[in-house]
Image (cartoon, grey):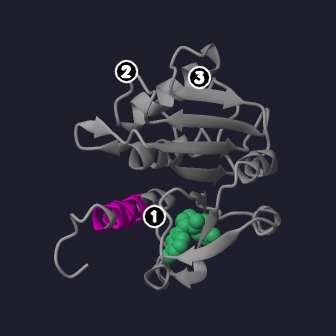
Amino acid sequence: MREFVLYARKAATSTDFSLDDLPGSGGRMDLVARCVCNALWISHDLRRDACIHVVACGAPNPPLIISFYGSLLRAVSPDERSIASWIKKAPEGKNPGIRVRKLSFQHLIAELAADGRFFYIVHEKGRDISELHLREDAVFILGDHLGLPLKEEKFVARFPHEKLSLGSTSYLASQCITILNYELDRVRMRKEGNAPVGI
Ligand SMILES: C[S@@+](CC[C@H](N)C(=O)[O-])C[C@H]1O[C@@H](n2cnc3c(N)ncnc32)[C@H](O)[C@@H]1O
């Protein structure tokens, strides 16, 4: 399964943020919702082989991990407001595709590492993606508008990993997820023998 981890430094860790003010009261919940959309949605369908873990580190009760599973999501549509409204309802546990846990970033990484997962730290200063044989079933770790804290990057670096760059342009985290999904789709097409000539 392709897995994304978004480190969201300011994302609200209570349910009383306003759907009318996702950037402000939600601590950039607009950014979080866009990342969830780009990780899991394609046209008229969900990516059933993908999930995204949002590490919410904002006030008042950090850290909290909100995980979205494409294979299990029900009744969510891909717009920011719908995704954010489900984040608000997540503690009620009514959507089988959304799980909330009181867990830190490092605990999540240790859990995934114990499962033998390979990590890509997605960072402007990594190895260019064109030099890598991208692994489809890896965990891709991204920062938000403030980037991934160095302390957390060093923790991930204890486990099998590669630092992966999409070039010198600094993209939005949500844009990076789209690019990665596209590249991973191409890897899969090549494996299945469906790749267009030239890739
Ligand atoms: C808007 S950027 C954060 C920029 C922030 N000023 C920093 O220094 O990390 C959000 C996240 O997108 C990812 N990102 C953005 N552009 C990238 C690129 N060209 N290559 C790899 N990752 C990138 C990184 O994970 C980054 O933490």
Q: Which residue is mark 1?
A: 176
Residue that carries the numbered disc 2 in the rendered image:
75
**In the drawing, what numbered circle is on residue 90?**
3
Does 181 appear in magenta? Answer: yes
The residue under the point 28% across, 62% down is 189
Residue 180 to residue 129: above or below: above
The amino acid pointed to by label 2 is Ala
Circle 3 SS class: helix
**Mark 1, residues whose alpha carbon is within 10 Å: few (<14), some, or many (≥20)?**
many
Picture coordinates of residue 137 (x, y %)? 52, 56
Which residues fall within the magenta stretch? Answer: 178-190
Residue nearest the viewer, comparing 25 with 173: 173
Vertical arrangement, residue 137 with respect to residue 75, above or below: below
Q: Quadrant of residue 52?
A: top right
Give the residue drawn at x 68%, y 69%: 161
Picture quadrant of ligand 1: bottom right
**What amino acid type is highlighted by mark number 1?**
Cys
